[in-house]
Amino acid sequence: MAISIDTVYQRVLALASKEQRGYITPQEFNLFANQAQSEVFEQYFYDLNQWSRQPGNDSVYADVDDMLEEKLQIFENTDISGVVTAYSGGTDKTLPDYIYRVHRVELHNVNCEILSTKDFNDCLCGGYLTKPSHKRPIVNIRNNTIRCVGDYNNAVTPTGVFYFKKPDKVQWGYFVMNDKALYDSSPNKTTNFELHQSEETELVYKILKFAGVSMQRLDIMRAGQIQEQSQVQQEKQ
């Protein structure tokens, strides 16, 4: 279930307005909200990489890993109908902008080995035993372009792409009445956060921190920063 952007906005306003600290306009809030959502989303991958280095029999690691996987599942998609690979002509495919990271590529249900540009080129120029084939296809992703090679070093189009999409841009919709911005929840005006509901508090603190920087109010910035750090430490205990 999505996080209500209006709930987050009202909490941020309540914290920022305490002791007449200031007001955050809807336009400012929407900018800060998208930046906060992006930071939380990208942190998932850093955290997953960090915890994956822990011993496999560590129960604490297992719990954190499961939690991160649950949060990432919201953004995981599978393209087996050619939507992604039909995005551009030719065998080299430019990935759509909504894709954040590809984590698996298949060719006729065979998992492709995703290689760096150097290893990819070395493999193409290698001997008989190292050359790619339909039984061992290879893939390289560079400059948002995906290249897949199978038998006889022929470029081919992948039949399956598994990826994480970027979160949709959030928007607190509103209309103006008597010079006051009032919440408009209609779908064409408002877009809620896609993040896991457990991230609501961290979003509030991050947005509060950004607002403090924008308003040049160190008290607001520090309040958000301290609460954000406390939240992160609590999650990693």
Image (tube, helix red, strand yellow):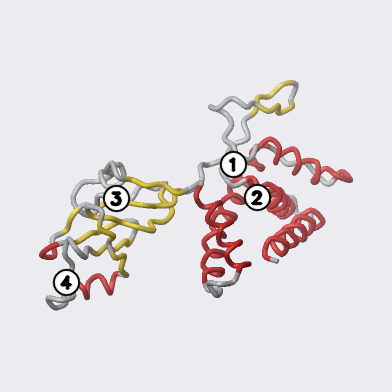
For marks 3 and 4, the one nearer the N-term is 4
Q: Which residue is mark 4?
A: 131
Q: CA distance from mark 3 to mark 4?
A: 21 Å
Q: Using the image as rendered, state which of residue 180 and residue 55 is in the foreground.
A: 55
Q: CA distance from mark 3 to mark 2?
A: 31 Å
Q: Which mark is residue 199?
A: 2
Q: Which mark is residue 160?
A: 3
Q: In the image, what residue occupies the spot 38% across and 56% down?
A: 102
Q: Which mark is residue 193?
A: 1
Q: In the image, what residue occupies the spot 29% across and 51% down?
A: 94
Q: Could you say whether the residue bearing mark 2 is in a helix, strand or loop?
A: helix
Q: CA distance from mark 1 to mark 4?
A: 45 Å
Q: CA distance from mark 2 to mark 4?
A: 46 Å
Q: Could you say whether the residue bearing mark 3 is in a helix, strand or loop?
A: strand
Q: Using the image as rendered, state which of residue 29 and residue 227 is in the foreground.
A: 227
Report if the CB atoms under discs 1 and 2 are less than 8 Å apart.
yes
For marks 2 and 4, the one nearer the N-term is 4
For marks 1 and 2, the one nearer the N-term is 1
Q: Is residue 31 left or right of residue 111?
A: right
Q: Quadrant of residue 66?
A: bottom right
For marks 3 and 2, the one nearer the N-term is 3
Amino acid type of the residue that numbered disc 3 sits on in the rendered structure: Gly
Q: Could you say whether the residue bearing mark 4 is in a helix, strand or loop?
A: loop
Above or below, comparing residue 127 to residue 36 in the picture: below
Q: CA distance from mark 3 to mark 1?
A: 28 Å
Q: Could you say whether the residue bearing mark 1 is in a helix, strand or loop?
A: loop
Q: Position of residue 213 (x, y in %)?
A: 71, 55
Report if the CB atoms under discs 2 and 4 are less than 8 Å apart.
no
Above or below, comparing residue 17 to residue 100 in the picture: above
Amino acid type of the residue that numbered disc 2 sits on in the rendered structure: Glu
| Discs 3/1, front | 3
Amino acid type of the residue that numbered disc 4 sits on in the rendered structure: Lys
